[in-house]
Amino acid sequence: MDNPSIITQVTNPKEEEILSCTQDKVSQCNISLKKQRSRSIFSTLFCCFRDYNVEPPSTNSTSALPPLVEENGGLQKGDQMQVMPIPSGIYYFHGTEAVQQSFHYKPPAKYLLPELTASDYGKKCVVIDLDETLVHSSFKPISNADFIVPVEIDGTIHQVYVLKRPHVDEFLQRMGELFECVLFTASLAKYADPVADLLDRWGVFRARLFRESCVFHRGNYVKDLSRLGRELSKVIIVDNSPASYIFHPENAVPVQSWFDDMTDTELLDLIPFFEGLSKEEEVYSMLHKLCNR
């Protein structure tokens, strides 16, 4: 296993000059977000996934739903694809209209999250990405690294240098007060778990999910929110990669990918938005309003 394969990251434009067409679109969108931030943080939240060139599952067939995944991350051949059996039905979105799936699917053998605790009862669930959302990590030495995490790969210990995104401490503390917070990363646990130990000094994350909990779909590790064991209308995902939430784009609050800009205020700017969202009955109405501004 090569070193970078344990961390799932987007390309740092400072380290690679030639980007794919998809990456160009994301970069252009992030520049647009930066220019508009002084006018309104809310008007920029949904730019990235509208323009991101990732093809979602077709809504004309059962492939619109994510495949059943075993606990080790493999696909079960011959099985139908699953949805979470919520009484009100599962809703997948195409554009701004919800289409209720009426098919009968094999229920998942086990949800990804444990039972909701008494202290989190009534709270919405916020799924938060790690790399390029909360931190940036590198096997190359970083002079101002906040953490240096040793990771064993094929019998050899490698040092991973981790830089915290500005205002991540304030963001996590406030999110932990308002929501049931879950860390969900496509990176491997051997790297992400010790980073989370150092990052989350307050015990904000009630659970941690890693690459084996993702669905591998069209070359991307997708975070299938329907497998969490929570009502989708009360789930939000915060992620820098639109491919990560391609099954549930209407549940997403996109953020710009972060590498080393110490003047970045993205997480700080998001706190008032989440304070308002925590008071809503469900997440879709507020996210739709923001998307349509």
Image: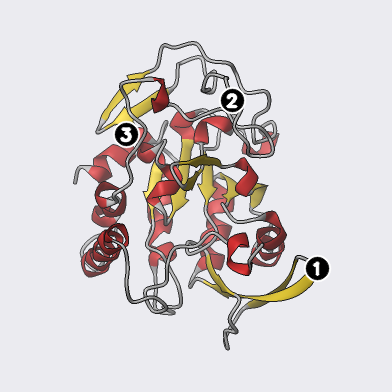
Mark count: 3
Q: Amino acid at mark 3?
A: Ser
Q: Residues within 10 Å of mark 2 (few under 14, many from 20)?
A: few
Residue at (30% x, 57% y) in the render: 22
Numbered tag placed on residue 155 in the rendering: 1
Q: Of label 2 and label 3, which has the lower sequence position? A: 2
Where disc 2 sits, the SS reads loop
C-alpha separation, residue under disc 3 versus residue under disc 1: 50 Å
Q: Of label 3 and label 1, which has the lower sequence position? A: 1
In percent of width and height, residue 88 lies at 46, 16
Residue at (70% x, 58% y) in the render: 193
| On screen, residue 114 above or below 18 | above
Q: Amino acid at mark 1?
A: Gly
Where disc 1 sits, the SS reads loop
Q: Residues within 10 Å of mark 3 (few under 14, many from 20)?
A: some
Q: Residues within 10 Å of mark 1 (few under 14, many from 20)?
A: few
Residue tagged by mark 3? Answer: 285
Where disc 3 sits, the SS reads helix
Find out whether the residues at labels 3 and 1 contact each other: C-beta distance under 8 Å. Answer: no
Residue tagged by mark 2? Answer: 77
Residue at (34% x, 37% y) in the render: 56
C-alpha separation, residue under disc 1 versus residue under disc 2: 33 Å
| On screen, residue 27 above or below 228 | below
Q: Nearer the viewer, mark 3 or mark 1?
A: 1
Side (left or right) of 174 relative to 21: right
